[in-house]
Amino acid sequence: MSARPQYYTRTAQILHWLMAAIFITAWFIGFYSGNFLSYNADGAFKGNVITLHKNIATPILFLIVIRIFWRYTHPSPKLPKNMSIPMKKIAHLIHWILYFILLALPITGCLFSWSAGHPAPVLYLFNLPTLIEPNPNLTAIVKPIHVYLSWFAGLLIVGHIFAALKHHFIDRDNVLKSMTSQGKS
Ligand code: HEM
Ligand code: HEM
């Protein structure tokens, strides 16, 4: 049996920060498009902004598959001893919810686009294969799921960031460092 490490592997760290950067960028662009732009004002601009949102967000679908595989094969560091058992359980639960969101948001985003008859493009390079026919009834279901889930994700990530900062600056433990360093150098 191998002991639990003190730090996430370099690969896990790179995947975490790369996906966090993509996620937060896609979130703000989606939120801007959904709440501050209207088709009446300037349809072409709004269309370009949504297209940017999709092109940035779709790589999450590929990265999450690698990340789940990596997480499954590489144990995460132990949480600090001074955390209570219920707090550790809550921290783990939130991590699993974040993984779920990393899968569910791009999937509902793609279903939303396809069901409305639009493509799901990746980094302006290619479109994901369209898996469903246009279907307004499905749009009516997946659109609110995508929107409400994105708001829930926003709240959860604000909490996640505050928790990381609290660990670092108030509890002064190893939690943030476990995601930024390898403990050497
Ligand atoms: C990490 C992944 C994603 C995040 C964090 C995210 C986040 C968001 C947010 C915050 C909104 C605005 C919700 C509102 O109206 O308040 C939104 C809207 C939207 N998202 Fe996503 N999304 C993601 C992935 C995707 C993907 C992969 C697609 C499609 C391929 C997509 C398509 C859309 C569309 C079409 C809208 C509506 C925009 C509008 O009404 O102007 N999303 N998303
Ligand atoms: C500036 C923003 C962020 C900071 C400072 C941050 C910080 C951290 C830290 C310190 C950990 C290790 C926690 C621990 O071991 O208990 C962690 C884990 C994690 N973070 Fe973040 N994070 C950020 C953004 C995000 C975003 C946007 C997402 C995804 C939507 C995310 C998803 C996760 C997940 C799923 C884990 C669990 C990793 C695992 O154990 O497999 N993080 N984060």
Image (spheres, rainbow, N blue to C red):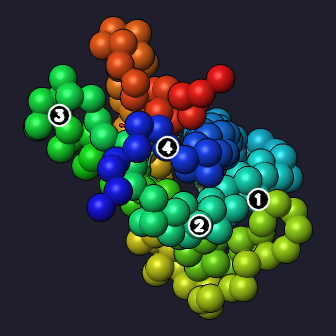
Distance from disc 4 to disc 3, alpha carbons, whole Å, reads 20 Å
Ligand 1 has an atom within 8 Å of the beta carbon of the residue at disc 1: no
Q: Residue at x 56, y 75 (%)?
A: 111
Give left or right: position of 167 versus 143. left
Of discs 2 and 4, which sits in the foreground? 4
Residue denoted by label 4: 8
| Mark 2 or mark 4: whose residue is earlier in sequence | 4
Dot placed on the residue nearer the N-terminal end, 1 or 2: 1
Question: Which residue is label 1 attached to?
Answer: 55
| 94, above or below 59, in the image | above
Please give the residue where the numbered disc 3 appears in the rendered image.
87
Residue 23 percent location from the top left of the image: 60, 46
Q: Residue at x 88, y 68 (%)?
A: 125
Q: Secondary structure at mark 4?
A: loop
Q: Amino acid at mark 3?
A: Met
Kindly tell me whether mark 2's CB lies below 8 Å from ligand 2. Answer: no
From this view, report whether residue 127 is shown above or below residue 34. below
Badge 3, how many Cα within 10 Å: few under 14, some, many 20+? few
- Between disc 4 and disc 3, whose residue precedes? 4
The x and y percentages for residue 83 are 19, 27
Q: Position of residue 100 (x, y in %)?
A: 39, 60
Up-down relation of residue 115 to residue 177 (above or below) = below
Task: Report the Cα–Cα distance between label 2 and label 3.
Answer: 28 Å
Decide if ligand 2 comes within 8 Å of the CB at mark 3.
Answer: no
Res 9 seen here = yes
Q: Residues within 10 Å of mark 2 (few under 14, many from 20)?
A: some
**Residue 50 appears in the figure:** no
**Residue denoted by label 2:** 66
- Measure the alpha-carbon separation of dots 4 and 1: 29 Å
